[in-house]
Amino acid sequence: MSQSDQHRFAMQVAQLSRAWRAEMDRRLVGLGLSQARWLVLLHLSRFDELPTQRELAQSVGVEGPTLARLLDGLESQGLVSRQAVPEDRRAKKIALSPQAQPLIEKIEAISTQLRLEVFAGIDEDDLRRCQQVHKRILSNLEKR
């Protein structure tokens, strides 16, 4: 692959990511959540056990102080709570409140609908190959 092709591919991946997030934001605007907040809720909902703030930050891909500010906002909306960890007084576990579940279900439904629309007409084999390529690129990035 030429450098020009690599450049175009990298630009398309970045453009795809921005466009996907922008469309999700547009569809979720009525829920009163920023992209960062709905992303935190989705990640939090996928943990089997309550994560620590550090584990959640790693999952979402943000720095600790950034997550702390997001959690402050979500906590003020009554969507999450922080719980002390007895064995480590500096750590906090993050829990979803009961009010968050209907919101997460709406986010999931909107996200599912968007995926159905954007993947329409894409062959499963093509999608699998694309996933393999992206996985390899991510692996190469993680080695850095």
Image (cartoon, rainbow, N blue to C red):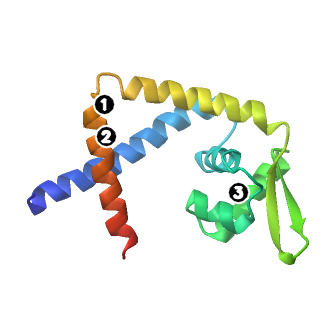
- Report x, y in % for residue 112: 53, 28
Q: Position of residue 128 (x, y in %)?
A: 31, 40
Query: Along the horizontal axis of the image, is 123 left or right of 135?
Result: left
Q: Is residue 37 above or below residue 139?
A: above
**Mark 3 neighbour class, 10 Å CA radius: few under 14, some 14 to 19, many 20 or more:** some
Q: Is residue 6 above or below residue 45?
A: below
> Where does label 2 land, which residue?
128
Please name which of the two marks, 2 or 3, marks the residue nearer to the observer: 2
- Residue contact between numbered discs 2 and 3, judged by CB atoms under 8 Å: no
How packed mark 1 is, by other alpha carbons closer than 10 Å (few <14, some 14-19, many 20 or more), is few
Left or right for 28, reference 70: left
**Distance from Cα at disc 1 to Cα at disc 2:** 6 Å
Label of residue 70 in the image:
3
**Quadrant (top left/top right/bottom left/bottom right) for the C terminus:** bottom left
Name the residue rendered at 27%, 47% in the picture.
12
State left or right for residue 65 relative to residue 62: right
Identify which amino acid the numbered label 3 is placed on.
Leu
Mark 1 or mark 3: name the one nearer the start of the chain: 3
